[in-house]
Image (cartoon, helix red, strand yellow):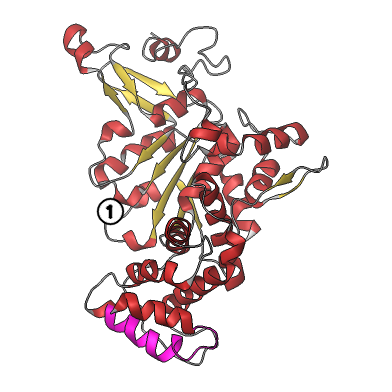
Amino acid sequence: MTVSETIASTVPGAGTDTGTDAGTGAATLPAPAAPSGPDLGSEALRPHAEHAFADELKALAAADDRPRPARWRLSPWAVATYLLGGTLPDGTVITPKYVGPRRIVEVAVTTLATDRALLLLGVPGTAKTWVSEHLAAAVSGDSTLLVQGTAGTPEEAIRYGWNYAKLLAHGPSRDALVPSPVMRAMSEGLTARVEELTRIPADVQDTLITILSEKTLPIPELGQEVQAVRGFNLIATANDRDRGVNDLSSALRRRFNTVVLPLPATPEAEVDIVARRVDQIGRSLDLPAVPEGVEEIRRVVTVFRELRDGVTADGRTKLKSPSGTLSTAEAISVVTGGLALSAHFGDGILRPADVAAGILGAVVRDPAADRVIWQEYLETVVRERDGWKDFYRACREVSA
């Protein structure tokens, strides 16, 4: 039996006119059925990127006249434009999904156009998951082929599993095989995602080595394999704080091109990121508009950056840093929570009292050490800062 035949006999739907790549003979799994029920764009609490930004993706595809890699929905240039934002010739405005150095996005997109997988690395809250989702949405039109890494992630989540009722009734067969998101991506030439790769046990991580180097996934129970078709690639994310949890083996790390996502370079950039994301989240939750609370967003970002950097913005006062990451993602969470408070228990305008409790929860992770650091910061920095009296009083009240 040839490799093409073994694949066709293994994967459901393979060997049909629509299920086989004519160039390689590799299997193509059937596309997932379209979700039924209410319109995703209006009813889903958190729509997938390809649904939330469907109009932008459609406009980019229509205006995109550049070469596209096999099975890509957009050219690399259009994918980068989708992430970084811009204005198309017809006047369509593409909103930025990532605010940061353009070269980082260009390297990430270019990596996906090669046969090397992409590893997005950075401290928690640097938009690694956000970027991976939007990359998959722009490249493949499907960001849902996802493996969530945890300490309990099994090998089956990356390779394949079995329908045990069919397995017990009829033994190992193609009908009993349950493909993983990675197997689906290989068979259909799409982009798979693995979140928090370093949270996955090392022996399970190494399941990816053959997939990424040989572009095959063996199925020893059937004496067969699945070959990746053109267009397949994989995006993984990992954060710096997880070093030493389940470090990647050198063999696996060589299969990835690593792109480090930095924290926002300037306070203005971080304020812009927080305001944009809070506005997007707020609209889905029917919360007040962000412009009314820009000053409080600026305060939250200032507090987080100063405690994170261990020095005040003017460079005059050294500070102790708490144990938490105080990331941009946490700032977004604090402001979103504050907006909800102002909407349901206030006048709809974001005020110091609305964000004070959220800041305290983000800063004081260690009740003993972090509380001392926070109190010192309040008394030596916040108390003396012009225009921050209301903020100081609100923080003192929740810290008491």
> Does residue 116 appear left or right of residue 90 in this picture?
left
Q: Is residue 100 visible?
A: no
Identify the residue at image location x=59%, y=64%.
292
> Does residue 319 appear left or right of residue 53 in this picture?
left
> Does residue 64 appear left or right of residue 220 in this picture?
right
Which x, y percent locates residue 216? 41, 28
- Count up the numbered dots: 1
> Does residue 273 appear left or right of residue 151 in this picture?
right
Image height check: is 77 above or below 67? below
Identify the residue at image location x=25%, y=46%.
201
* Residue hosting label 1: 246
Q: How many residues crowd mark 1 within 10 Å: few (<14), some (14–19), many (20+)?
A: some
Which x, y percent locates residue 228? 47, 26
Instruction: Looking at this view, name the residue that lies furthest to the right.
Output: 89
User: The N terminus appears in which quarter of the rendering?
Assistant: top left
Q: Nearer the viewer, residue 66 or 214?
A: 66
Identify the residue at image location x=53%, y=68%.
297
Magenta-highlighted residues: 371-388
User: The C terminus appears in which quarter of the rendering?
Assistant: bottom left
Amino acid type indicated by mark 1: Asn
Magenta span: chief secondary structure: helix
Specify whether residue 375 is painted magenta: yes
Which x, y percent locates residue 246? 27, 53
Q: Nearer the viewer, residue 364 or 238?
A: 364
Image height check: is 122 above or below 114? below
Q: Nearer the viewer, residue 20 or 239?
A: 239
The quadrant in which residue 209 appears is top left
